[in-house]
Image (tube, rainbow, N blue to C red):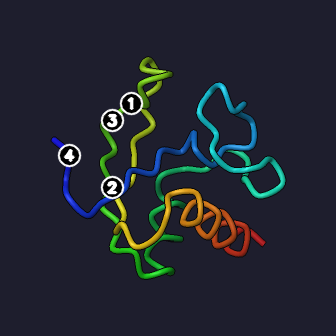
Amino acid sequence: MKERGKLVIWPAYIDKTKSRRDGRIVSRKTSVESPTINEINQAAQKLGLNPEVEADKAYPRSWWEIKGRVLIDNTAPKTHLSRRICAAIKEMRS
């Protein structure tokens, strides 16, 4: 069921190894390689987006891979928040 005021961030949205057709919504330069929901959760917490992890969910385009998703506060457009999450993950990895 859809929650009001929340955006869904699937790992495929910010995965450098995925194509646009496979679900990536940010540029390859901005994206990160193989992000996990734990990294997305930590980055969203760092940005103050009140994340909620749902680990038992599968991205509809790749329904056979259960990688989970993260719900965050809808405070800006999804692509803008995805770019900020990517930047935070890159910072955490370095």
The residue wearing badge 4 is 2
The residue wearing badge 3 is 57
Say which of marks 2 and 4 sits in front.
Answer: 4
User: What is the number of the mark on residue 46?
Assistant: none
The spot of residue 76 in percent (x, y) is 46, 70
Amino acid at pointer 3 = Lys
Q: CA distance from mark 2 to mark 3?
A: 10 Å
Is mark 2 in CB contact (under 8 Å) with mark 4?
no
Residue 50 occupies quadrant: bottom left
Secondary structure type for disc 4 = loop
Which quadrant, please, contains the C terminus?
bottom right
Residue positioned 30% across, 60% down in the render: 6
Number of other residues with Cα within 10 Å of mark 3, as a class: few under 14, some 14 to 19, many 20 or more: some
> In this rendering, would 46 be left or right of 26?
left
The spot of residue 86 in percent (x, y) is 66, 63
Mark found first going from the N terminus, 1 or 4:
4
Which quadrant, please, contains the N terminus?
top left
Q: CA distance from mark 1 to mark 3?
A: 4 Å
Q: CA distance from mark 1 to mark 4?
A: 15 Å
The residue wearing badge 1 is 58
The residue wearing badge 2 is 53
Residue 57 occupies quadrant: top left
Amino acid at pointer 2 = Val
- Looking at the image, the residue that sits furthest to the front is 77
Amino acid at pointer 4 = Lys
Residue positioned 45% across, 64% down in the render: 41
Residue positioned 25% across, 64% down in the render: 5
Task: Using the image, determine if residue 68 lies above or below residue 77.
Answer: above
Task: Using the image, determine if residue 18 lies above or below residue 90.
Answer: above
